[in-house]
Amino acid sequence: MQARRLAARDIACRRGDRLLLRGLSFALGPGEALQLAGANGTGKSSLMRILAGLLAPIAGTVEREGAIGLLDERPALDPHLPLGQALGFWQRLDGPHDNRAADLGLAGLEDVPVRYLSTGQKKRAALARLIGQQAPLWLLDEPLNGLDTRGVALVEGLVAQHCGAGGIAVIASHQPIAVPGLARIELKDFAA
Amino acid sequence: MSGLFLPLLVRDLKLLMSGGRRGGALLPVLFFLAVAMLYPFAVGPDAPLLARTGGGVIWVAALLAAILPLDRLIEPDLELGFFDQWALRGISEEALVAIRMLAHWLSFGPPLMLATLPASVLVGIDAEKLRIVELGLLAGTPGLAALGVTVAALTAGLRGGAALGGLLVIPLAVPLLVFGAGSLAIGGEGGIALTGAVSLVLLAIAPFAGGAAIRAARG
């Protein structure tokens, strides 16, 4: 099995002119999960984008071994396309893989245009895209937003399954989330 | 990488072509024809004058028509998070911009060249001039497409980006217009060759400039 690792060393991040975080470090190996907890505006999303490599930290380094799968508030699905076709586009890029649409509560929605889906259904659709990507490193930015209690249990189950198979998950959320062996970092401890 | 090229191009084409959700190719073509139709009304029924200036008007109309779809080229995909997801899959912004340039050109270049046939009748230019205009457009529209995608990438995410995009394209398209429309006056291949040369320069620069602009918009 290929090496999987996600480590951050001494990360500092800012938004605009404001320094949000500094001195944040962690290291995750296969099967480990971490929750980044903090109130709104503490830099969770900026930190997720830094971990994903989409944003450069103003200090510190991130080491990634393995492909990154990112789930954030933007589902990256064409709003006018039926859900089946919108997910089909990503399947053509990522290769065929069962994204377990039925388990995700998306059965029967294949012909519904993405823009008509509810917030929770869009989140489930984005989860289907993430699963189909088969990336070993998951970065989930507020994955529970808009989901009902069954949806929350679903995300918890998916993360547990992902980590059970040797994957790594980082979850940024202000809500409690129940995943076995979940480590927790309070971002306010690193506030600048 | 070659396996990714086709799905990306097909998606871009579906979004930009006629009936696509981002306005389609029909709007620029209708705009182009409307300008060609209005021109004789404004100038009056002076056939020699129309024939002398008609080619230039077709060029100006083509340039303005190419500006119309600018705000739909990059910004929606940036907002929906597509560019982030592509970046995570290791697809370079340069490749994405190059593919989008191809799709953008296919969606407006050939339709515009087709619409030039009725437009040439409206402004009353003869077959020889029509040939030069068509060849000039063939040489010049790829450059316009490259310019359009680059400027769309630069202005994506800016407030009033669409209007700004149009203002940025016009001065940058002046060389294309000078050589393209100028080839009519000198009536020769020299102008068309120069138009093609300008296009090639723009095509070479655009993926890198556009790619860098998309990465900068992310920060």
Image (tube, grey):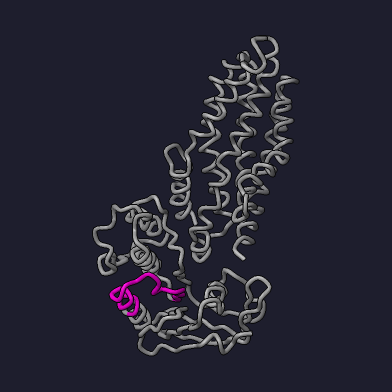
The total of numbered circles placed on residues is: 0
Vertical position of residue B51 compared to residue B74: above or below = above
Quarter of the view holding residue A162: bottom left
> Would residue A132 be seen by someone viewing this image from the given angle?
no
| Residue B200 x %, y % | 67, 41
Q: Is B140 covered by the magenta stretch? A: no
| Residue A60 x %, y % | 64, 81
Vertical position of residue B71 compared to residue B62: above or below = below
Q: Report the residue that reaches farthest toward the front.
A: A40
Determine the residue positioned at 64% across, 48% down.
Answer: B151
Magenta extent: A137-156
| Residue A134 x %, y % | 39, 70
Determine the residue positioned at 55% across, 34% down.
Answer: B109
- Name the residue nearer the viewer: B25 or A98: B25
Determine the residue positioned at 28% across, 75% down.
Answer: A150
The C terminus of chain A sits in image quarter? bottom right
Q: Is A151 covered by the magenta stretch? A: yes
Determine the residue positioned at 32% across, 66% down.
Answer: A99
Quarter of the view holding residue B198: top right
| Residue B207 x %, y % | 62, 51
> Would residue B158 be seen by someone viewing this image from the given angle?
yes
The N terminus of chain A sits in image quarter? bottom left
